[in-house]
């Protein structure tokens, strides 16, 4: 089990960029996949992106591709970032990160695939 903490949310303007970060408190635990999800007023809970922490392979929600980038921090184990550029009002929501601790061959864009979740951080985009 890992404790995840998100940071970087806040009130931003449409057209700006935003970087969210998620770090696991336990650096010695092996995390195989990390993902970002969000809960928006329009779509409810939705998958945003995941990254394979071993290979660096990424996968995005279709609407996120091109605007959103997930990356792992090479200097800090078990830390990932989510970069959104440009922001739109539809990006408003509560953003969560999640971690998968058991390796089964491939990361998945399913919420039941992940073992641990962070508390989340609010992102509000004004038009």
Image (tube, rainbow, N blue to C red):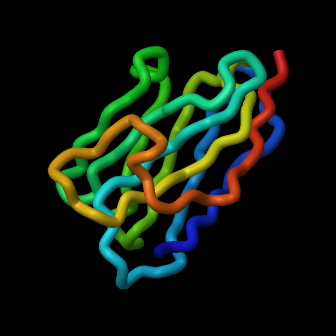
| Residue 27 location, quadrant | bottom left
- Split into 4 quadrants, where in the image is the C terminus? top right
Please give the count of numbered marks on the rendered protein: 0
Please state the horizontal and vertical placement of residue 114, each as a whole percent of the image. 43, 53
Residue 112 in percent (x, y) is at: 45, 45
What x and y, as percent, mark residue 111? Answer: 48, 42
Compared to 95, does 25 lie above or below? below
In this picture, residue 125 sits left or right of residue 78: right
- Residue in view at x 73 percent, y 32 percent: 93
Whether residue 123 is situated above or below residue 80 in the rendered picture: above
Which residue occupies 47% across, 22% down? 64
Give the left or right position of residue 97, taking residue 101 as reference: right
Residue under the image location 71 percent in, 27 percent down: 40
What percent of the width, then of the height, locates residue 13?
78, 26
Where 77 sits versus 121, above or below? below
User: In which image quadrant can residue 100 be found?
Assistant: bottom left
């Amino acid at each position: 089990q890992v404790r995840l903490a998100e940071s970087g949310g806040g009130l931003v303007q449409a057209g700006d960029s935003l970087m969210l970060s998620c770090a696991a408190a336990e650096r010695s635990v092996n995390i195989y996949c990390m993902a970002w999800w969000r809960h928006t007023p329009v779509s409810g809970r939705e998958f945003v992106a995941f990254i394979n922490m071993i290979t660096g392979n990424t996968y995005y929600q279709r609407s996120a591709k091109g605007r959103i980038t997930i990356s792992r921090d090479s200097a800090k184990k078990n830390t990932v970032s989510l970069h959104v550029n440009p922001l739109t009002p539809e990006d408003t929501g509560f953003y969560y990160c999640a971690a998968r601790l058991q390796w089964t061959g491939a990361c998945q864009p399913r919420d039941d695939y992940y073992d641990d979740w962070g508390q989340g951080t609010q992102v509000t985009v004004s038009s």
